[in-house]
Every structure is written in C-alpha cells, then in structure tokens.
Image (spheres, coloured by chain):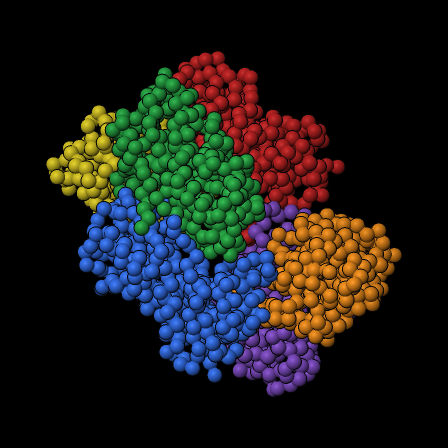
Chain colours: A red, B purple, C yellow, D orange, E blue, F green
Amino acid sequence: MTTVNDILEFIESIAPKDLAMEWDNVGLLCGQSSKEVKKVLVALDPFTSVCEEAVKFGADLLLTHHPLIFQPLPAVTDKTTVGRAVMTLIKNDIAAINAHTNLDCADGGVNDTLADTLQLNNIQKIPTDADGLLRMGEVETQDLDAFLDRVEALLGCSGLRYVSGGKPVNKVAVGGGACGSELYAVIAAGCDTFVTADVKYNQFCDAKELGLNLIDAGHFATENPVVAVLAKKLQAQFPDLTVKISETHRDCVKYY
Amino acid sequence: MTTVNDILEFIESIAPKDLAMEWDNVGLLCGQSSKEVKKVLVALDPFTSVCEEAVKFGADLLLTHHPLIFQPLPAVTDKTTVGRAVMTLIKNDIAAINAHTNLDCADGGVNDTLADTLQLNNIQKIPTDADGLLRMGEVETQDLDAFLDRVEALLGCSGLRYVSGGKPVNKVAVGGGACGSELYAVIAAGCDTFVTADVKYNQFCDAKELGLNLIDAGHFATENPVVAVLAKKLQAQFPDLTVKISETHRDCVKYY
Amino acid sequence: MTTVNDILEFIESIAPKDLAMEWDNVGLLCGQSSKEVKKVLVALDPFTSVCEEAVKFGADLLLTHHPLIFQPLPAVTDKTTVGRAVMTLIKNDIAAINAHTNLDCADGGVNDTLADTLQLNNIQKIPTDADGLLRMGEVETQDLDAFLDRVEALLGCSGLRYVSGGKPVNKVAVGGGACGSELYAVIAAGCDTFVTADVKYNQFCDAKELGLNLIDAGHFATENPVVAVLAKKLQAQFPDLTVKISETHRDCVKYY
Amino acid sequence: MTTVNDILEFIESIAPKDLAMEWDNVGLLCGQSSKEVKKVLVALDPFTSVCEEAVKFGADLLLTHHPLIFQPLPAVTDKTTVGRAVMTLIKNDIAAINAHTNLDCADGGVNDTLADTLQLNNIQKIPTDADGLLRMGEVETQDLDAFLDRVEALLGCSGLRYVSGGKPVNKVAVGGGACGSELYAVIAAGCDTFVTADVKYNQFCDAKELGLNLIDAGHFATENPVVAVLAKKLQAQFPDLTVKISETHRDCVKYY
Amino acid sequence: MTTVNDILEFIESIAPKDLAMEWDNVGLLCGQSSKEVKKVLVALDPFTSVCEEAVKFGADLLLTHHPLIFQPLPAVTDKTTVGRAVMTLIKNDIAAINAHTNLDCADGGVNDTLADTLQLNNIQKIPTDADGLLRMGEVETQDLDAFLDRVEALLGCSGLRYVSGGKPVNKVAVGGGACGSELYAVIAAGCDTFVTADVKYNQFCDAKELGLNLIDAGHFATENPVVAVLAKKLQAQFPDLTVKISETHRDCVKYY
Amino acid sequence: MTTVNDILEFIESIAPKDLAMEWDNVGLLCGQSSKEVKKVLVALDPFTSVCEEAVKFGADLLLTHHPLIFQPLPAVTDKTTVGRAVMTLIKNDIAAINAHTNLDCADGGVNDTLADTLQLNNIQKIPTDADGLLRMGEVETQDLDAFLDRVEALLGCSGLRYVSGGKPVNKVAVGGGACGSELYAVIAAGCDTFVTADVKYNQFCDAKELGLNLIDAGHFATENPVVAVLAKKLQAQFPDLTVKISETHRDCVKYY
C-alpha cells in the first residue's frame, strides 16, 4: 500500500525541503497523511479547475509545483479561490502535495528541466543570493531571432516578449517563473541571454541598457516542462500508481 | 430559507466585528456562506469532539465563542488538531461561525452574562485599555468565603483558586477567560474583588500585596454561561431552526 | 525669464505632491533650481539614451514621468545606470523634474489620459487603497477580440497579453503601468475588463478564475500617452519655451 | 570575611549566567558588592513581606529565585511594589541576589530538584527550544489518581488542577513554574504525564486532545523545593554564615 | 505640612508633564511621595557629589533639571554611578524630583530663562519638530566678538567654542543643552546667531557653510540659570521650606 | 596611466573596506572610475570650499577622510550642501574617494597617526565593540597641565576642553573624532587619560566621576594629521601624480 506520506517522502527526497526559500510553503498542504493513494493527478497549479479534474479523475492526491496555500489561511470558506479549492479537495478526500522553490533549485528540477528542454550544453548553476536557483548553458552562436524561434518551438509558447541586448546568443541563462530581478547575477556570470518570465518594464529597460538579451517566455511555458518529469519519476518509483498529467490545465495567458 | 450568511449577519448584529481585538479572528471561519441551515450546534469551543457531535447531530452550522482557527493555517492536514477539526467540518458540510472578543465586549455578551449569572447589581463597564471588556457590580457585603460559595454554586465550578486581599466582598469585577493582567484597572475602578480565569502566579501575588480578592473560577466556568444566551437569541431570531447546545462539551480541567 | 523652479511649481500645480505614494520620489531630482530654462525635453523615462538626446537637443530641463533616482544614491558614479544618467545631466547643466504617482492619480494625468485615449465614456475614479489611482468607463458592449483590436490600435501596441474572463466588454477599468494587484478593487467596482501592464502569472490566473478580462497592454503603451498631454500643457503655460517630445524613446519591449 | 560578591560568584558557579534566558534578569540586583555578609535569608520570591522578614532577621543578603527587578525601573518610589521592596532593602543595607532561569536549567537546580522531590528515576533533560529547561524521569506505572496523590503529598500542594490524557502514568516530565507551552516537546519526548504550573485553558484542552496527563501543581509548590537545596549548598560553601529559609513566605494561592 | 507629593504637583504645574519628550523621564524618580519636606536642595544635576551635599544639608528632597535615572535600571547597585546615587538618596531618606525637557519647553523654563539671561528682546518660540523647545529674540546689531563677550559675561562661561557665519549679530536663537541638530529650524526662522551647547563638528561645519553664527557656550552654562529661577519659585510657593541652591555643583568642563 | 580605479584599489589596500562600520559609506562616491588621474587634492572633508579648491587646482580626484555622501541622496540639487558639492565635482570631472571608519581602524590610519603625533610609546589597540578603533600608549608620568600643553602643541589646537580625573597622566587612550561614548572601554583598558573630540556634557561628567582625564582636542585637530600621512603614501605609490594637501581647509571651530 502506498500512502500520502510515502509519496511526500519521495518528493522530498528529490526536492529537499531545505532548498525552499524561507517565504515558501511546500509539502503536504491538505489532507490525511495516512491515506492510501491509488491515483495521482500532476499539474503545475492547484487551480479550482484542476481540483475539479482531480475529482472527476477520482484522484487520491494532487501533486503540483505551486502551493495550494500561500498566505496562511485565517478561514477556509467559499469567499476566496483558495478556500474553494481546499474545500473541493477535502470533500473529495484528495490530498495536496507540492514542491515549489525546492523543486526550482533541485538537481533535475524546474530549472535543469528548462535548460534541458532548451537543449543547452554544459549546464551549470549560476551563483545567486537564492543559491542554486538559476542555470546557464551554451548554444551554438546564433542571432537572437533564431534563438527566439527555438524557444517558441521547444517550449510551445504561443507568444514571447523580449528586448534585444544587441548581441548574438551563445551563453544562455534560464530561470523558470519570475526571475527577472536576477538579471545582474546573470550578467555577472557572463551570459548574453536570459530566458525567464513575468519580467517587469524596468527589468526589460535595464537589460537593454546593460546589453543583455532578455526573453519573457511565460511563467507557464518555462515551468510546465517539469510536470512531465515529475510524473515520470513518481511512476518509476511507484509502479502500481495510476499517475496522470492534468489534461485541462493549459496556459491561461494569450498573446494578441 | 435561512443561510449561513443570514446567521453570520445576525451574530454580527449582536456582537459587532469592530468590538473584536486586533489580534482576534472572528466570523465565518469555515464553510459555504450560501448554504441552507436547519440545525445549529452551539458550544464554547470547536474542539474535535464537539465537531464530531455536530456531525452526529446533523448540524449545518457550528456556532462557538472561541475561534476554530486562531493562527492562520499554512496547511489543512491531519497533523494538527485544528486541521483535523476543519477537515471534519468540511467533509460533513458544516460551517463554523464564532464571536470571540467581540462577544466578550458586547452588551449582553460574555461579561454581561457572567455578571448576571453572579447576580451582581448596578452592572457597569470598567474603563480598560481594551475598552468595554470588563464589568463590575455590587453584592451585599459579605466575607470572602460566602462569596466563594456563591461563585462555585452559580457558575457550577468543580473548584476554585484564589487569594484573599483581606477585605470583605462588596464591589466585584468580572472578566470571563484570561483577564488577570487587568487587575490594576480593577483596583483603579474601586473594586475589592475580581473574578476571572487563567490567573498567573505573579498576578495572584500582586493581588495579595495590593489587597484585592482575586478568584480564578476557571476559563470554562466563567465563559460557558454565554452559550445558553447565544442559543436562546438565535432561536428567537430564527424560530424554524433546530438549535442545540453541545451535550458533550464539559470543562476538561479537574481539581484534586 | 522662466526658471527650473517656475516649471517645478507649474508641474506640482497639475500633479500635486501629496497625491504621490509614500514610497515615491518626485519633483526636482537633479540640477539648479534657479537656472533659466529655454528648451525642455519631455519623455516617459530618463534613460541614458534620453539624457543623451537631451544633451544633443541642448535642453535645459528633462521632464519625465518616471523618476531619475528611485533608490536614494549612496554614490554617483559610472558603475550604475542611474549614476551615468545623473552625471550626463549635471555635466551638461540639465535639470531633471518628474511627476510619477502624483501624475498617475491627478485629474487629467496618466490614467485619465489612458481612459481618454481608449475612448471610454463616463470616466470615473475607482475606490482603491491608493486612492485616485484607477479610472473606469464604458464602451459599447463588444466581444473581447474587438476590444483587443481597439486597444492595440489606439495605444499603438506592437503586441498584447491577456486572459479572457468569458464576458463581453462593457465596463472597463484602466491603470497605466503595473496595477495588476488592484484586480480585486476592479471587480468590486463592477468592471468586466481591466487594461493595465506588467501583469504577473498569478494575477492573470486569478482574473480568469474570477471572470475578469485582464489585458496587459504594456507599461510603455499605457503610460506614454501622458507625455504628449504634459508637453502640451507645459507649452500652453510657457509659450516662449521650446518644448520637444523625445524622438528616440520607444518601447524597448518587443513581441514575437 | 565573606562579601556579597563572594556569594554572587558562588551562586554563578552553580547556576551559570549564560544559562539564563535572554529576557531574564539575574545576579546582584540591589546593594553593595563589597559589603560583608553574616546573615542570609533565602526565599522563592523577594516580596515586600519577605524583605521585611529579612530586616527583622538582620540579614545582609536576600537570596531568591525570582528577580527583585524584572522590568527595568524608571523610578524607585513607593508607588510600586517593586519600588517599595527595593527601598526597604537599601534602607536596611540588605543586598539582593537571584538565580532565575539559570537555576531552572542548571544541574541540581529547580527542575532537577523537582524531579528528585517527585522521586522520578532515570532523570534526563528534554530537548526544547530553551535548552536544558525541562526534565523527565520514570515512575512505576500507576493510574493518574495514584500519581496525583503522590504529587500532592511530595510537593505539599493544598490543591491541584489537571486533565487526564486517558493513559496510566509512567514517563513523567517536570517543569517548575509556567512551562505549559512546552507540552508539544514533552509529547515528542515520549512522556505520558507533565507536571508544571500556571497552565492556561487552551493548554489543558490541547493536552486532553493529544492524550497527555497535564498537572498544574502550582508555581510555588513546583519551585519552592529548590530553596532548601540552595540554602544547603550556600551553608556548605560558607560554614560561618547564618543561612535561614524564609518562615513567612508561603504559597498565597488557595483552593476552594 | 508640605509633602514630596505637594512639591511634585507644584513642579508639574509650572512644567507640565506632557511637554516632556517621549524618550524623557521626569517627575518623582526616587523616594516616598507622602514624606514631609522641610529642606530642599536644588541643582542642575543629581550627581553623586550633589547627593552627598544633600545628605550633609539634611535635605528631604533633591530637585534637579536632569533626571536621576535615564535608562531604566535593571539593578540598583554600587557598580554604576546611578546606582550609587540612588542608594545614597534612599539610605538618607531623600526624595528626587526632576523637570527636564518639560522645563526646557515650559514658559519661564530653561530656554526662557536663557533668553532672559542673555537680555534678548521680543522673545518668541521657534517652530521645531520638538515644539516649544527653542526661543529667539533680538539684540542691538553688533559684531560677533562683542556678542561673544556678552555671552561669556552673562552666562559666566570660562570658555566658548564657535564658528562665524560671517554676519553681524541681531536675531539670536537660544537652546540650552544639546540643540545643535536644530540649526536648520533656527535658520528657517530667520536667525543669524544660535547659542546652544554640545555642538558636534559637522554641525559647526554646516553652520559655517550656511552662514549662521553658532556658539557652543557649554551645557552647564546655558542651563544652570534655571536653577535659581526654580529655587525662587519653589520658595515663593512654599514659604516655610528651607530651599538651598547647590554650592558644590560647578561646571566640570574646563577650557585650556 | 593612473586611473581613479587604481587609486581606489590602493586606498582600499591600506584601509580595507571590511574595517568600515556597517553604517558608513566609503570608497568611490562620485565620478568615473576609468578616468585618468594626474592631480589629487587630499583633505579631511569634502566641503564645498574644498571642492572649489579642487577645481582651481585642476584636480582629477579629491581624496578625503569624511564621505562626500553620508545619507543616500534622493536628489542631487542645489538645495542641499551635499548636492552642491556633488554638482561642483561632476561638472569639473573630479572624482571623489574617501576612507572613513576603515581608515580610523586601519594600521597606520587615523588613530595610529594620532598616537604617533602625540608621541605615545608602546602603542596598542584597545578592545572595543567597534574593534580596532581606539589606540593607547604611554607617556612619561606628568601632571595634566603638562600633558594639555603637549596636546595643544603637537596637534596645533587653538583650544581644548577637558575634565580632570584627579590623576597624573601616564597611560593615554586616543580616538580621533567623536569617540566619547567609548570612555568605559578606555577605563577598562586601564588608561588614566583619553584624548578624543565632540565630547558631550554627560560624558565629561561621567569621566570626572569615574576618575578619567578626558580631553576634547577637537574633531579636526585629532583627525587632520592623517591627511599628510595619506598624501605621502599616495605620492610614494604613484610617483608621477601631483598630490597636494588642501590649503584652504582649516578647522572652522574657534575658541573664545
């Protein structure tokens, strides 16, 4: 018999808790740790629609990257989206486990997966304040347009935002999710190009002024590749489980 | 049809939210605000055993004085007593509403009820930092032993702790729950005797030195009288409801 | 003779200082207040390239929306982009004045201009914590695609990001720059659609779940319309000045 | 000749200062360090009545567990109980030394003495945040009533408050004074029973829910045994001193 | 009979407590409020030597400007100068009252007295953050050397430190004690000259650069004139008291 | 070619940055790090008058002890003395480097130079909270007047303030600038005499009571000796530079 707790321990073996940022909330955030698990739904986010998919699927556990609860809850009611999601899970006896910034930093986690997906070579960690967060690697020297094509194709983005730093692309840093504030560390590490998401105007402007190609490939597109990796590792470890990747969870953000 | 929300509005009409202390957590802390309510269980505390009684009773709502959630929850799991209580309620579709320090301070609330139960005359508010918290009133002048008898009989305590301030009892302050730190305000208001609970050693010692009769009649015994008052008011406002006072919730603290 | 100080007073008459957020830095941030001004360059940002344009133009004053200095400077050197900009201005005797969040909130400021540019009707303020920041107005009811067309055309965006809330567009909120965190106030005000910029992933996701059309039209595109308005007001007040809108300052962010 | 300072050094050798909590105030809190000491009064608390006993006894030093001054004094006047005690001591040339949380934690201190007094076997420290504070040990397995009898008899309590955790008593934790908040550490250490004081309602309720027998044996009764131990050690070290245990200091708290 | 408390009330009638700065400590800082007072020693400071003079004089009360206790005392021992002073007073049954920043600000207090002593005309308050602190007035226009002569003669200083702001003296600000940080308020009020004490190097340098004559006439010399005023008011109010000004308290600072 | 950066590196080799206090601001505070340097002006302070001397001298760099910018600047305008100094330097292409508390603490820095200038023997560091700040050494035992003569002569002070601790002078502590609050560390180190500056009234009074000769020899006089040392070291390292000590910067504080 595989329990919620068995899966929690496995997840924490591949994404150790002490890699998580101090402000983060990771692990078992909802449910009964002793419950038997037969079916697991894996998704990037525990949105209400994903929780409903878990119910339809008959899942015992929802495994996600982003946490179900971020700000601790003073109440669990239908007045908030988080409250509704928690109630849906509890009523249907579905536990929720997540690995967030610990999975970002872990070997083989979000950022290693992103670097792999972009087919970078000689992948290494970039020294940052939040150590182990970013990765960098190399591509054959190419102009920015060619690289933008590659990013869109490999990540399956429906659009991109970027500034050109005026340089060809060779040494590429990656940071899934919102890592724009790390652009100075990226430059200090000698990179010419940085792929991340949720980039703010002043970060784009600084990058241009400092000569860095900065690409916002989308939060979903840069992080979602880890979902398949996670599902695969889970299945390999627990062959008897039915592990399914969410079918309904798509990137909600569109380009026009 | 009476909804959870209708009852919340009524409770907040008799114990307005802005009377609550800043650190408190009051109102609808669990459940669906639009749900129809037919049965209500009323109790001092939302302990797991009380939640289970609510399930057996078929309650749609659990109404308590103490909050279900005090420290906001980073997770809702079986690893904590609060998590277990919240899960029990949600699985059984039972909402939870509470009125805590707002009910302490409200007219006709915890402390007015306590003063009434002790049959004090000329009941008035005592000026304190947490305004409106304490009440004082008068009894026929009597020695402390006679008054201890009265307290035990009227509150149904199975025991008491006290220090004698060396004075007969005439002007009595009351503060349900842990109000021992207010003893200076009580003395400043001219009282000779103070009935409260959860009194600490140094508060007992200070009271003795300052000549105040200080009686710790128990947290449960000093606050529980409001439960019946609350149940009665609720029933009067919503005659169609089945309102029941918890049968299982007794004072857990014993004297030896 | 028109001095830097005369222009500062005029700017503060149309964008009063006390409308600025507490964390903001507005007013005369560089230069000599008594200096005579003959030529003014107006731009959204005081980037190094804009400062160089001011030098070539022979400007005495650079008037911008965003502040030249945001974090107070422990040093003014060539090691930072801000230091380089400040040194360029001082060496060429060019003062720098800005109106930032005070211009966002001011009547006829950034957000009124944005609402006008989008041809909204019945323009009103939306109550928010940072009072006076957002505006809302109406358009003829239309589907989201039609409205996206309008936004792109009227603001001259080269691209957009958005989520559909599943509703037609009729009541539109606008907030130039990064106002995504105000989406709850926008919904509370009864709007179906919100045009702003620098929207983060979780804000897009929340909007979708809450049924709000949320459009990130770009920081530059949503704020730049105020530059022409500012230049025009300045010219009207000081007819002898040579007032020029920056020719080099374009949106650095591109879509792919 | 034995001076105040000699005694201070001895006390700090058996209860080292660095064992004290950061918020505590220990050591020489009143008087002349060079003064000769012939008579010492030892007591749990430096209350005014105890200070008066010291005067009558002709003491040169008052040695206590609780500090004479806890909150630093902005004034030394007759308007506060502490001010009166300090003035009484100074006028009569009596120094005051105390060992508080350093004595709680010290080997052979408050908690070792409490464990000894309760005749526990295999006494060990319990790991807690405030390291070294609690002790645990074993008794022959017995039901709770038998153990309550033992506690009352051995500590000489005039009453007790407790909750039953529904288990027989075998592995007992002790913490003199107000240690109720440590009940989670006590459970984690595998104890079934915890003897401490000043226990609050929610701590009693948590203990019951978590299956821990929790006994509030009184602040005085749990800490006072150390007074005799302290007096004995002092006398052994300084045979020429006249060391007396306070005769007037009794537990002020009564049970009814 | 005149008590310590009667004198406290009188002092607080001429220097109301709510004029004191938030960080200050004023009023009865030592002794018995009900004690009868026959002899009062008045001095600027409650130094040990002054306390000993009080003992010799047989004083019942020591009235000073500076507080006996500034940082609240965690202990009252011979290890600190304050502890020694407090013990000396208590052993000899001498109470201590002070009026510090409340007397600085009060009408007829430290700064009015200083302005009077310097024979300023048209004395007014200067608006400052710590409202009511400084005074300003006029002298016949004179060069700085002449004014330095006047200051030295009228205050009885044995030396002075100063910078010249390059202007003749006409409009003079005064602030007894350490008010150098108020020099910007002094300039804003239109003064050319500022007499205060404990002036720091950067304050002297700023004054010179800003064109203000800044004179450090000594902490003692600028504040001590109020002692005679205070003694006189006290004697007038309580004619039966023996009021004496300290004979031993002189300025300890010398010039070379 | 010698650049600003070359000189910065040299300065930081003799006064390492990590010796600076946490609140300090040291290093290159203004200008272009790559600029060639031919002429350097060295001074204690970067006052406006010194900046103007640097302009007249044709300096490329101003090297000072005190920082040009202390509080980080929200604006660089003519409304503040610092803003004017920064603008003067930038307009004339003069960089500004300083070594402040790092030079105080450095071997051969401010305090070693002060000790040397006073011809102390056996110079050692005094243990303090701000480690390495103070120095102490010995003189032939002499009375205080003789030592005051020596101080005035060797430092070229135009005046002194002091208190006598009632002891002859033999073991002397020195701390350039405002180190009066370190007097307890000085006494603990066994010194009888302390030479520093910007001493406050209560520090003088404490010194007298504690028996320490405390001499305020002026901020300028105690720190300025390091200027010549700094100039000499710089010239030795970079023989081709024209290094000049400021001729206009004199102590602004006068004695009367």
Residue at 76%, 68% in the rendered image: D245
Q: Nearer the viewer, residue E227 or A4?
A: E227
Q: How many marks?
A: 0
- Residue D188 place in picture, x, y as percent: 74, 49
Left or right: C247 in relation to A245: left
Q: Residue furthest right?
A: D140
Residue at 48%, 79% in the rendered image: E38
Q: Nearer the viewer, residue A179 or E26?
A: E26
Residue at 69%, 36% in the rendered image: A9
Quadrant for the C terminus of chain C in the image: top left
Left or right: F32 in relation to E46: left
- Residue C170 place in picture, x, y as percent: 33, 44
Q: Nearer the viewer, residue A238 or F188?
A: F188
Give above or below for D79 relative to F206.
below
Left or right: A100 in relation to E25: right
Query: Does residue C70 appear in this view?
Result: no
- Residue D141 place in picture, x, y as percent: 86, 57
